[in-house]
Image: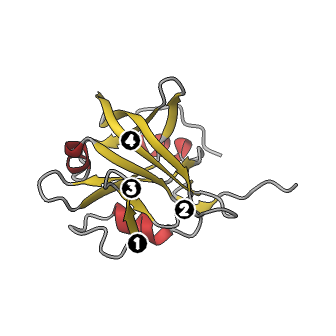
Amino acid sequence: MTITTDITDSRHYRDVMGRLPTSVVVVAGRDAETGTAAGLVVGTFQSLSLDPPLVCFSVAETSGSWPRVRAGGLFSASVLTTGQDAVCRALSSKSPDKFAAVDWFPSPDGSPRISGAHAWIDCELCHEWTGGDHRIVIARVRNMVAGDGEGTGPLVFYRGRLGGYREPAA
């Protein structure tokens, strides 16, 4: 076992932080200019506050999709379920039409919700700050619904791989 304490070594940072399982969430809205679906996958989505209901996540400064989602101000977060690896790959791509092969339907405000997701959380952008090479986003929850993924667990990212959460044995 190699012990490294140099936190400036990005490979070491990724190796250690990769041991922290993260959710796989699609953040999607409507491009303000074209009205088309725009979105990206984040692995940092989490609850921030109950009163008021707020969530937060981070987005790489280099993201080409986040500015398109941000411009609309409203978006839906779809918590992917086990087995939605292909959806994750499609929406993580640099393709100009990421949603072409993804089954989705509009939320009440028109934001894309991924069909079969574990949960949907409709949001309104509140704040955004720079955090190193990422943007830290805080959003107000407008609506939330448990999804179709009943009986399956959420899709998680762990040690560089996608996998499913397993319910503990009763």
**Left of 93 or right of it: where is 8?**
right
Which one is in front, 148 or 157?
Answer: 148
Mark 1 = which residue? Answer: 103
C-alpha span from label 3 to label 4: 11 Å
18 or 49, nearer to the observer: 49
| Helix, strand or loop under label 3 | loop
- Residue denoted by label 4: 123
The residue pinned by badge 2 equals 162
The label nearer to you, 2 versus 4, is 4
> Residue 144: where, in percent of width, then height?
50, 46
| Three-letter residue code for mark 1 | Asp
Q: Earlier in the sequence, mark 1 or mark 4?
A: 1
Q: Viewed as shown, does residue 25 lie left or right of 164?
A: left
Q: Amino acid at mark 3?
A: Ser
Q: Which mark is residue 43?
A: none
Whether residue 2 sits left or right of residue 77 in the image: it is: right
How crowded is the residue under tag 2: few (<14 C-alpha within 10 Å), some, or many (20+)?
some
**Label 3 to label 1: alpha-carbon separation:** 13 Å
> Few, some or many C-alpha atoms within 10 Å of disc 1 (few <14, some 14-19, many ≥20)?
few
Q: Secondary structure at mark 1?
A: loop
Secondary structure under tag 2 reads: strand
- Of the numbered discs 1 and 2, the one sitting upstream in the chain is 1
Q: Which mark is residue 107?
A: 3
Q: CA distance from mark 2 to mark 4?
A: 25 Å
CA distance for labels 1 and 2: 20 Å
Q: For label 4, count other residues whose C-alpha is less than 10 Å away and answer few (under 14), some (14-19) or many (20+).
A: many
Q: Is residue 87 above or below residue 128?
A: below
**Residue mark closest to the camera, 2 vs 3:** 3
**Furthest-right residue in this view:** 170
Q: Nearer the viewer, mark 3 or mark 4?
A: 3
Quadrant of the snapshot with the C terminus:
bottom right
